[in-house]
Image (cartoon, rainbow, N blue to C red):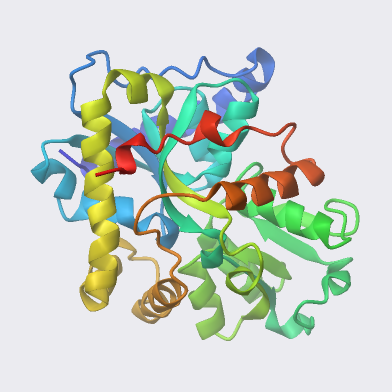
Amino acid sequence: MATRTTRTNKRCIALAAWLSAFSLVLAACGGGSGESDGSADDESTALTVVTLSGQLLYFPFQLAVANGAYEKAGLDVEEIIVGSGSDASKLFLGGKVDGTATAVSHTFLGSTQGRDVKIVQSFTSDAALEVVTRKKANIAAGDWSALKGKTCGATGPGSDTDLLLRALLDSNGVRPDKDVTIQYTGGAGAAIAGFQQGTLDCFLAIPGMRAQLLLEDLAVPFFELSKSEMADNPSAGLSLQGEIVRDRPDVVRKFVEVTLAQVQSIYDDPEAAKKAAQEIYEGLSPEAINADLDFMIESKAFSLDGLQSEDGFDKKIQLYVDAEVLPSKPKYDDVYVNTFLSN
């Protein structure tokens, strides 16, 4: 069955020390095989999926875990919660979990490294994201040159808040690590503290964190991706090891169908979705959750069909390659498997 509490916490504790050591092994050995060791039986309904805490980008998956939808569908989904996208990436690309409900950029990166990983459903587009700046820094909205000499935050190296922020800075004439300092916070909570303490000047804010910063009057909007040509670019979704996609199609189809149903329920009953989110994201204020869910629903950031346009994919990949945050261009058909999204 799906798990959020004791079982998950035990796995999180056991994995904490491993994550630190694994980053060194991955660098030395070129990474894992991309094969999952989370399931030995091809007929198994068990899936171990890593996700992040306090981030509404991954709400459809986390909602299905919390309300028992996977269990009702006969799936045994174990949720592992980590603090940053870089931690999730290490687990997934190292083949230590079956899947990830996080940023799809990790799957893009894995594909360029020859790992057998696939995206089976898109949750959200970049429309859900927004660059914000510290209010007391008095940085004019859209003035990228004003960020020079400032400190911008990201949750961790290789996280989507890191990769996309670097790409945005680079495309607007600001050199990461040269013109601007990138400081890794380890999580959204620490990033909020950075704004409170004046140690961070900007951040690529994720839903939940975004509203919290704005409601506490700590930050102001700087660059709204929902109003840019990047609104259709891929952001978050469900990714799985390629072996599972090929060998357990019935399980994957059911997994995707259940998760898609959660997206529909968010649009059908926003108030019920807000109530559920407040129970899941205990570290965020109800006001922040409500504000950002309204923002995501109004901007249609949640994908009802789970599909990602090839054009949006190409634009984001080109942005990443131009900024040298990806070494090469993965092909759409190499990373996206849309088979499970058809009726």
Visible residue check, residue 327: yes
Residue 192: x %, y % from top left: 57, 69
Asked if 253 appears above or below 129 in the picture, the reply is: above
Tell me if 340 is positioned left or right of 29 in this view.
left
Q: Quadrant of the N terminus?
A: top left
Residue 281 is drawn in which quadrant? bottom left
Front residue of this view, candidates 64 and 178: 64
Residue drawn at 73 percent across, 31 percent down: 328
Residue 296 is drawn in which quadrant? bottom left
Front residue of this view, candidates 320 and 132: 320
Front residue of this view, candidates 23 and 208: 208
Residue 58: x %, y % from top left: 39, 54
Asked if 296 appears above or below 320 in the picture, the reply is: below
Residue drawn at 83 percent across, 53 percent down: 176
Residue drawn at 48 percent across, 49 percent down: 308
Asked if 323 appears above or below 217 in the picture, the reply is: above
Visible residue check, residue 90: no
Q: Quadrant of the C terminus?
A: top left
Label count reads 0
Residue 107: x %, y % from top left: 54, 35
Residue 71: x %, y % from top left: 13, 42
